[in-house]
Image (cartoon, rainbow, N blue to C red):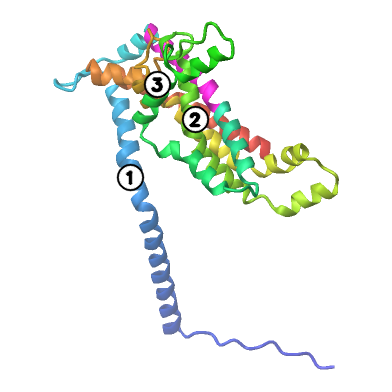
Amino acid sequence: MSAVAPPVTEQPSGGASAAHQAAQKRRRRRNLLVGWSFILPNFVGFAALTLVPVIGALAISFTDWDSYSTPKWAGLDNFQRLWNDSNFWAALQNTLYYAAGHIPLTLVVSLGLAVLLNQKLRGVHVLRTAFFFPYITSLVAVAVVWNMLLSPESGPVNQFLTFLGIDDPPGWTSSQDWAMPALIITSVWRDMGYYMVLFLAGLQTVPAELYEAARMDGAGAWQRFWHVTLPGLRPTTFFVTVMITVSSFKVFDLVQVMTEGGPGRSTLVLSQLIFREGITQGRFGYASAVSLMLFLICLVITVIQFRMQRRSER
């Protein structure tokens, strides 16, 4: 039995090899330029709107500057003042309070809506649009409407509570104890539609075969949700949690319109303190020091969330 000889490949000559290498270099260069053309606009926007302002705030935080005169080097004076400033600690406490209420409530409500509106219901598309509509509504309009709804004297919410037999309904935005819960309720109502859409997109990626297999094994609705839906939504839940966390610590506009930080300092948050110190009082050095602390808080919490996500995936 004779052995089959391997096919003989024709080796390119010296001139053909050089031409082939030059063509490969041109192809790599073209692919590199195409790749840069995709990421360059985003990188330029990030550098202009985020990276440069962060570096600028870091530099200004070590100065005493009112935006009209030449900045004066202040060293660590702004950070020393921040440490002894009761307004900063009150704002930090209020920001943590707002985040502790806003993050879990928004997660639970938006996930519940997504699971409910992922069913084959009549008019489901209208309901999805209705729940998403508050997110694209003017924030000022949202704040004015909720201030009317939560009015202690004539608001329909307190009228309904009185109808139920509650003699002393909450004062909401006029009460130091209830102003922050009023902000959290309004914020959850406004944001739940947006995160509901993200969860709805995540639900489309959960394979239907897993639900069929769970039904054949006799799993009930709660067991299918706990053992199929939640694990399938883990990447979406992580993304939504990070987004809600960052937005909770940066909350400003809703507080500014609804309560302006009051009554007293009961709803003063870090972003509003930065606005007061920088824009209103003209103390840009101290405002930059506060903004730097807010940036570090968001960075540390986000890093912790990423590490917890990696640990859960192992």
Neighbours of disc 1 within 10 Å: few (<14), some (14-19), many (20+):
few
* Residue 109 occupies quadrant: top right
Alpha-carbon distance for marks 1 and 2? 31 Å
Mark 2 or mark 3: whose residue is earlier in sequence: 3
Is 201 above or below relative to 24?
A: above
Q: Residue 265 vs residue 168: left or right?
A: left
Q: Which residue is mark 1?
A: 45
- Residue 72 coordinates in the image, percent (x, y): 20, 17
Name the residue beneath numbered marker 2.
Answer: 189
Residue position marked by numbered label 3 in the rendering: 148
Q: Secondary structure at mark 2?
A: helix
| Residue at 37% across, 20% down | 258
Q: Residue furthest front?
A: 163
Number of residues whose C-alpha sits closer than 10 Å to that of mark 3, classed few (under 14), some (14–19) or many (20 or more): some
Q: Main secondary structure of the magenta part?
A: helix
Outermost residue to the left? 69
Name the residue: 29% across, 26% down.
Answer: 59
Residue 232 is situated, as x and y percent measured from the top left of the image, at 67, 45
Task: Report helix, strand or loop for mark 1.
Answer: helix
Image quarter (top left, top right, bottom left or bottom right) of the N terminus: bottom right
The residue depicted at 55 percent of the width and 30 percent of the height is: 106
Q: Position of residue 76 (x, y in %)?
A: 32, 14
Q: Are marks 1 and 3 in contact (CB under 8 Å)?
A: no
Q: What segment carries the magenta color?
A: 86-103
Residue 181 appearing in the image: no
Amino acid tagged 2: Trp
Q: Secondary structure at mark 3?
A: helix
Vertical placement of residue 199 versus 213, above or below: above
